[in-house]
Each structure stands twice: as structure tokens, then as C-alpha cells.
Amino acid sequence: MRLKGVKLRRAVPRRRRKLRPVELIPAGGVDRGLLDELGQALQAELGVQWRVGDALPLDEAWRETEGGAYRSIHLMHALMDRVQGGAGKRAGRTWRLAIADAGLCVEGVGEVFGEAAMEGCCAVVGVAPLRAGSGADGQVLRARLLTVAVHELAHLAGVAHCRRASCVMYPSRHIADTDRKRHTFCAECRRTLNLRGLQET
């Protein structure tokens, strides 16, 4: 029965947002428990679907002779090789984030906390420099790792560096930068983040 003067609207079911799959790759013997906690935190913060993938061995040929850190570009290439060797649509849609129990460096830049292929599919984070100072405390280490991981995943989503020191996308040159900004986005970076299906919760 239709009531006179009253417009009835049909209920349209809302489409559920597909969670972005993220594969966490242990590199160099990183602790599995640390990866599990990171995955749970990333799911809570960014709404991603995560799993731990097969380990990525660190080749000694990738190591910088002077400082002992590994050249992150080699880890990135190894991850990209995995993407090319994957099968199905899910393999191409999955982001791969390697967590290396080591220091990382970039030629011409020096030591870095992480690196990502802008709007790409692969990123890497080095745990060793996150242990500096108070980082020996497990809670501090986990907070720092989450901050750097969110930063690198946001690069994969197309979010560039931010000039606001309180935003997670501010480039960390020292561990103090990481501790200060934590994993919070500014409003502008949050809008960019949403373009690729991620959303800060």
C-alpha cells in the first residue's frame, strides 16, 4: 500500500569496502611475534587485510661495505620479483612490506628507516635503527615500527612527504622525528590516503 503524499525509499544495501591485502615479509630473522603485532596494528589503523609471507633471505652482497647496512634497493627488487612471479589478480593487488632485522641505506642519501615505490606495490622497513636509545623497550620499538610502516604503506597509496612535522608523512631524518609524529595523518594527507581505498580509523 502506498500512502498519499509520502515518498517511500527502497533500502539499497551498502557495498562493503574490500580490504587492501598486505603481505608482511620477514627479512633477516625478524621476530614473528613482532610481525603479528604489526599486522594487527595496521589492520586497526588502516583497515588492511594482512598475512605473513615467506621469509626473504638477506644476501651479503646487498650489504654496504662501510656501514654494514643493506642497500634497500636490492630488497625492493627482490620483492618486485615476487610480484612478477605471482599468479592471479590478488597477487598484483597485494602490497608487500618487508621488515628487515637490519639497517638500511640508499645510495646518495645514507641510512634510512624505510623505502617504498611511490604508488607501487613494494616497501621495506629496517628494524635495527628503531632500537636506538629507548627503542630497546619493546613497547617503544613496536610504536616506532608502526609509524614507519604506516609511512611507507601510505607512499604505496600515493601519499607524498608532508611538511607538517606532526604528520606521519613528515620525512624522518632522526629517530626523534619518528617519536614525535607517531602514526597520525594530517587532514590533507588523510584525504589523499582515501583515494587508494585506505582509511585511517
Image (tube, helix red, strand yellow):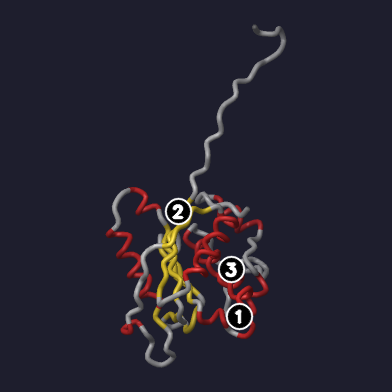
- Image coordinates of residue 56 in percent, x first then y, are 36, 71
Task: Using a 10 Å C-alpha cutoff, classify the residue at mark 3 as few (fewer than 14 neighbours), some (14 to 19) or many (20 or more).
Answer: many
> Marks 2 and 3: in contact by CB < 8 Å?
no
- Image coordinates of residue 91 in percent, x first then y, are 35, 54
Q: Is residue 48 above or below residue 10?
A: below
- In front: 140, or 169? 140
Under tag 2, what secondary structure?
Answer: strand
Task: Using a 10 Å C-alpha cutoff, classify the residue at mark 1 as few (fewer than 14 neighbours), some (14 to 19) or many (20 or more).
Answer: some
Q: Quadrant of residue 172?
A: bottom right
Q: Marks 1/2: CA distance?
A: 29 Å
- Image coordinates of residue 15 in percent, x first then y, are 52, 36
- The residue singled out by tag 1 in the image is 135
Task: Using a 10 Å C-alpha cutoff, classify the residue at mark 2 as few (fewer than 14 neighbours), some (14 to 19) or many (20 or more).
Answer: some
- The residue singled out by tag 2 in the image is 21
Identify which residue is drawn at 37% across, 73% down.
75
Which residue is farthest front?
33
Which residue is farthest right?
5
- Image coordinates of residue 41 in percent, x first then y, are 58, 61
Q: Amino acid at mark 1?
A: Gly
- The residue singled out by tag 3 in the image is 147
Q: Nearer the viewer, mark 3 or mark 1?
A: 1
Q: Marks 3/2: CA distance?
A: 19 Å
Q: Which image quadrant: the N terminus?
A: top right
On residue 98, the disc is none
Identify which residue is drawn at 58% across, 68% down.
147
- In front: 52, or 77? 52
Q: Amino acid at mark 3?
A: Thr
Identify which residue is drawn at 57% across, 67% down.
146
Q: Amino acid at mark 2?
A: Pro
Q: Marks 3/1: CA distance?
A: 13 Å
